[in-house]
Amino acid sequence: MRLNEIQTPNSLKEMSYDELSLLGNEMRQEIIKTVANQGGHLASNLGVVELTMALHRVFDTPCDKLVFDVGHQAYAHKLLTGRYNEFKALRTYGGISGFPKRSESVYDCFETGHASTAVSAALGIARARDLNKENYHVIALVGDGALTGGMCYEALNDAGNDKTRLIVILNDNEMSISKNVGGLARHLNAIRGSVSYRKTKSAVKKGLAKIPYIGNGIRVFMSVIKDTIKRTYTEKDGFFDALGFRYLGPVDGHNQKSLEQVLTQAKRFDEPVLVHCITQKGHGYRQAEDQPDVFHGIAPFYVESGDLKKQPKRQSYGEIAAETLLKMAHEDKRIVAITAAMQAGTGLQAFGLEHPDRLYDVGIAEQHGVTLAAGLASQGIRPYFAVYSSFLQRGYDQIFHDVCLQNLPVCFLLDRAGIGGEDGATHHGIFDIAYLRHIPGITIMAPRDKYELAAMVRWTLTQEGPCAIRYPRKSIDMADKYPYAGFEKAKWETLKDGNDAALLTFGLMIETALAVAELCHSVGISMKVVNCATIKPLDCAMLKEIAREMPFFTLEEHQVACGFGSEVTEYCVLNGLTTPLGIFGIPDTFVPHGSHDILIESLGLSAPQLFERMSEKLAEIRGQHG
């Protein structure tokens, strides 16, 4: 049976292993072709093809519930659950998501976009099953990288303590995005070497069977001490057993028959079970096998070579921030960098190479990363935590309690701020101002271009309290048209003067604001454009001046609720000033996946759309004053 003929996973159950092998190859080719055209998560999905087929053959989905951790390993699952025809539009606006989506399919029982959540969700589903007196299996497919996050252990401990019937599949490929770090990674390395246990066990069984009369008796005795042998060779300190899970494995995650055998065995237990599968990230595509970190999440590429179709023309903002930090680290030994399994994504590879003892990769553990930074800062070290904006949400309480309450000089470098694009709602960095600005004492900044970003990073070393710099991936160079004069906290910059109205904005939206000003100029409206590089604290002197002289608008690539415009409005109300004529940003909605330009237009934030909305409001004001 061909892949395009499969409408439900039930079709797999009657296929032979030879047919499954051909189907697996076809799925890999479809995934490679689609990601090469659309971009997406490649290496992780290529690694779980056989495992996904085995899960759907052994279990009865969607009655049995399958929860993916992170979700970027669900492409094969989508192909097997009736979404082949839609797969070509993966991650495009209006197309299917790159992550599990409940609105897409009954086979997607829970949505996951960040790591370390699947065991908790699956445990909740399993307990709901028990409360409802129902009978089905609940399976959490967890990458070993997710086990660097503390939430996994909270859930494992809870499930094991209560002995809730649950199956956790540990997809062990030694990688999250960057190579896994920490004690657990070393523990899993030890278990992977347990082939000696399996060989010993097999040899002993065969040898005993050949002994006449007493062989069977000895074999019964040996079964009593089997757990001891297993712990010696595989479990070392009985880690998963100590958590209350029955451990099965390790099993070759690319051997279809072995996978099905161990999963069938897991179904028989009325207690928590952990199945340890060894897979290869990027399996079946040499370029991804050789560079699994590069092909974790990748832009469109040429299949034959693996080269990107569009080579980046300029450094990303993350690379610029990291490069500046590296230069500072040469000059100041107090500087350290922290990453949460995102060394490559945040541009810190060079820092790690030159200062390996001053780069801390904490794994997928943002909460720990924040408090680690606080502890370092409390002893005179200057920590910089480079992290995606949407991922830092996970460390909110630690930011409040451990960093800001103690007024510690921790700097958060918030990469991928703003609309994140094709990864969708879980990855858009459009909430960071809202969850940071209300905390007393924190300084929040956003650069207009690469020169201002470098200046901000350098300035943070003079700051004796917490601060955050938010920036998108795309970098901008405005120096030719707008020479850069330097950064000063709470001092805004007029990029374009005007007399009729003002537009206050920051970051990536500055280009849009300047385009709006040009459109206004074409119809006789003189629009001032202000770069509000310091979001908190505000430039109160300039804001008062503008509010008293002309109508003004705010513009941000962030949620309107609790964002920059809200902050400006609060200040104006409290100080008896005219409030903004319009607050433009992202409305009260979760933004779907799609290209940045398409999403901006869908939200009414393109330059022509903004010009129309602003000119209408200005016309209303003119009409009122008549």
Image (tube, rainbow, N blue to C red):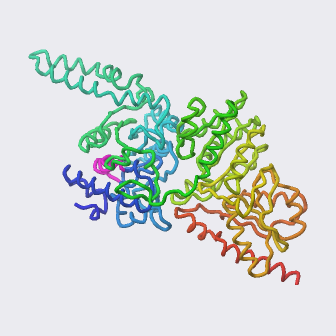
Is 624 placed above or below 66 here?
Answer: below
Quadrant location of the N terminus? bottom left
Q: Position of residue 163 (x, y in %)?
A: 43, 34
Residue 558 appears in the rendering: no
Q: Position of residue 287 (x, y in %)?
A: 37, 48
In percent of the image, x 26 and y 27: which residue is there? 198
Looking at this rendering, what residue extends furthest in the top direction? 214
Left-right relation of 276 to 520: left
Please tell me whether residue 47 belongs to the stretch shown in magenta: yes
Is 420 placed above or below 199 here?
Answer: below
Left-right relation of 475 to 623: left
In percent of the image, x 56 and y 31: which residue is there? 356
Q: How many marks?
A: 0
Q: Position of residue 430 (x, y in %)?
A: 64, 56
Task: Specify the quadrant of the image occupied by residue 538.
Answer: bottom right
Residue range of the region highlighted in magenta in the rendering: 46-61
